[in-house]
Amino acid sequence: MSNSNPQSSATLSQDDLKTLVGQAALHYVVPGEIVGVGTGSTVNKFIDALASMKDQIKGAVSSSVASTERLKALGIPVFDSNDVAELSVYIDGADEIDGQGNMVKGGGAALTREKIVAALSRKFVCIADESKLVPMLGKYPLPVEVIPMAAQQVIRQFAAMGGQARIRLKDGQPLVTDNGQILVDVTGLQISDPLAFESQVSQWPGVVTVGVFAFQKAQVCLLGTASGVKTLTF
């Protein structure tokens, strides 16, 4: 994407861009309803902005323990997803997004709950800075949540596809998700057909969730750029 305002790019950090798109996302929050809230550093900016209109919404359904804690600390009620039949909008970030609204998500290890909340929602609004926009998914490591006993088999299946998968570690041990499972991160893939890829990998025994969001892709992306927030619709 061309940078039409080089001067402002020097003054707007990546953190500033996240703040801008977090505030812009308030436009999509429907007063009087419950909003779906994702996970990650960009979403944290949205949660902070959401506090300014917390009296206008019923509350939120959250995709992670971390986001739930942040919402509650700001006085925003958090509902269990099982108690909500439908959400008007889900607002979340992405590790990558392509020109059709397909995404790779899960850098923050919350991909399974993110996909559940996205499936509850009529509209997915992605908030991201322009570095996340890619011509084809696969630049960022693909997170896949797996049941531990299946990890090595899943790693072999990705190797057969040409990908290199490794178990995500934290403090030298496999990182454990909010769901009590582990993650493998896969590099070396070019995901030219995200819908077919998501469908295929989701059927592998032991895979809980693959971090490709094609079935639950974004309808809107608020992209933080050097010249302000750019709105992409899909």
Image (cartoon, rainbow, N blue to C red):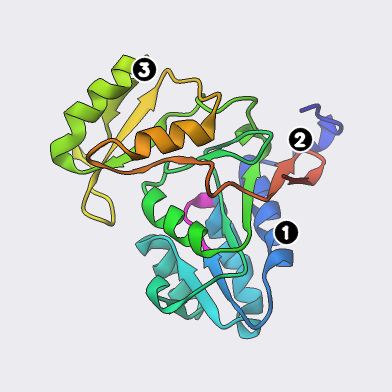
Query: For the residue carrying disc 3, how many other residues have a C-alpha within 10 Å: few (<14), some (14-19), or many (20+)?
Result: few
The majority secondary structure of the magenta stretch comes to loop
Quadrant of the rendered structure where residue 203 is? top left
Q: How many marks?
A: 3
Q: Is residue 27 left or right of residue 48?
A: right
Q: Which tag is nearer the camera, tag 1 or tag 3?
A: 3
On-image quarter of the C terminus: top right
Amino acid type for the residue under numbered disc 2:
Ser
x and y percentages locating residue 125 in the rendered image: 64, 55
Q: Is residue 117 left or right of residue 22?
A: left
Q: According to the image, label 3 marks what residue?
A: 161
- At 61% from the left and 65% from the top, the residue drawn is 89
Element class at badge 2: helix
Q: Nearer the viewer, residue 177 or 73?
A: 177
Amino acid type for the residue under numbered disc 1:
Ala
Q: According to the image, label 2 marks what residue?
A: 9
Q: Report, in whole angstroms, how far the alpha carbon at label 3 lies from the one at label 2.
A: 39 Å
x and y percentages locating residue 108 in the rendered image: 41, 46
- At 54% from the left and 50% from the top, the residue drawn is 216
Query: For the residue carrying disc 2, how many other residues have a C-alpha within 10 Å: few (<14), some (14-19), or many (20+)?
Result: some
On-image quarter of the N terminus: top right
- At 44% from the left and 37% from the top, the residue drawn is 198
Earlier-in-chain disc, 1 versus 3: 1
Query: Do callouts 3 and 2 mark residues in contact (Cβ within 8 Å)?
Result: no
Query: For the residue carrying disc 1, how many other residues have a C-alpha within 10 Å: few (<14), some (14-19), or many (20+)?
Result: some
Amino acid type for the residue under numbered disc 3:
Met
Q: Nearer the viewer, residue 50 or 198?
A: 198
Res 24 label:
1
Range of residues picked out in magenta: 37-41
Q: Is residue 210 left or right of residue 221?
A: left
